[in-house]
Image (spheres, rainbow, N blue to C red):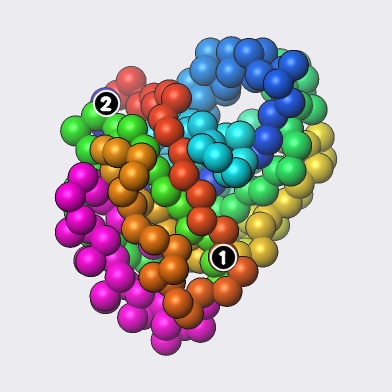
Amino acid sequence: MKREGSQGLMAFWADIEPANLLRFQEWHNCEHIPERISIPGFNLGRRYRGIGEAPSFLMFYETDAASVFASDAYMARLNDPTPWTQEALTYFRNPSRNIYSLLAETGQAAPMEAPYIRTFRFNMAEDAVSRLSQEWLPSVGAMAGVYRVRLYAVDEEISGIMTSERQIYGGGPGQQRYLAMIESERSDNGGEAGALTEAVDLFAESFWLEIALHPSS
């Protein structure tokens, strides 16, 4: 059942070595996403495949609030990974995982799920972020083929929690405080990184949809 109104996001970027690709996809499709979206407060799990120089995968979960990612139910899963999860996490290379809270959004979710997504990870002065919300988001959201644009800020405390899973894959939070996500129907739309003139430490990356799952009820 599709749920709207999510305020929390966990976004995880990682490369996967080609020899382990199918095993990773089987695990993520058949065990991991179904397990995660069964946790109270989880509304959606998606995985996107990187285009060009982007990381191999962007995996993310949407929740009622960022605090869901510090809940007892979620922590219990992170600190008691299944044998298959313990195996799969060793495949991750260059992992970066952050927990975010929604700051602003414009547009509507795609009728099913957006086939393409463009992400911008960056740092920026707070006054510039306010202008970004008021000017850049609406202008990109008005572009033909764009479904929705969302802007997030990292929750540093929750992102930094050490867990048994994190000890396996060895990564941690990224260095960028803000994340903009543009959901669109085509790979050639979704804004230009050059428009973020006041952003620093910028990573602009595009991905196409591999899988999306919603809770059953």
The part of the image, by quadrant, that contains residue 159 is bottom right
| Quadrant in which the C terminus appears | top left
Q: Which residue is mark 1?
A: 202
The one of 102 and 112 positioned closer to us in this rendering: 112
Per the rendering, the mark at residue 2 is none
Q: Quadrant of the N terminus?
A: top left
The amino acid beneath tag 2 is: Met
Residue displayed at 17% across by 50% down: 144
Kindly identify the residue that appears in the image at 51 percent across and 32 percent down.
49
- Total marks shown come to 2
Instruction: Answer whether residue 136 is magenta in the image.
Output: yes
Q: Is residue 170 above or below residue 127?
A: above
Residue 109 on the magenta segment = no
Q: Earlier in the sequence, mark 1 or mark 2?
A: 2
Can residue 9 be seen at all in this image of the molecule? no
Res 156 visible: yes
Q: Which mark is residue 1?
A: 2
Mark 1 crowd level (few <14, some 14–19, many ≥20, 10 Å Cα): some
The range drawn in magenta is 124-151
Is the residue 167 above or below the residue 179 in the image?
A: above
Q: Nearer the viewer, residue 73 or 153?
A: 153
Residue found at the far bottom of this picture: 127
Element under disc 2: loop
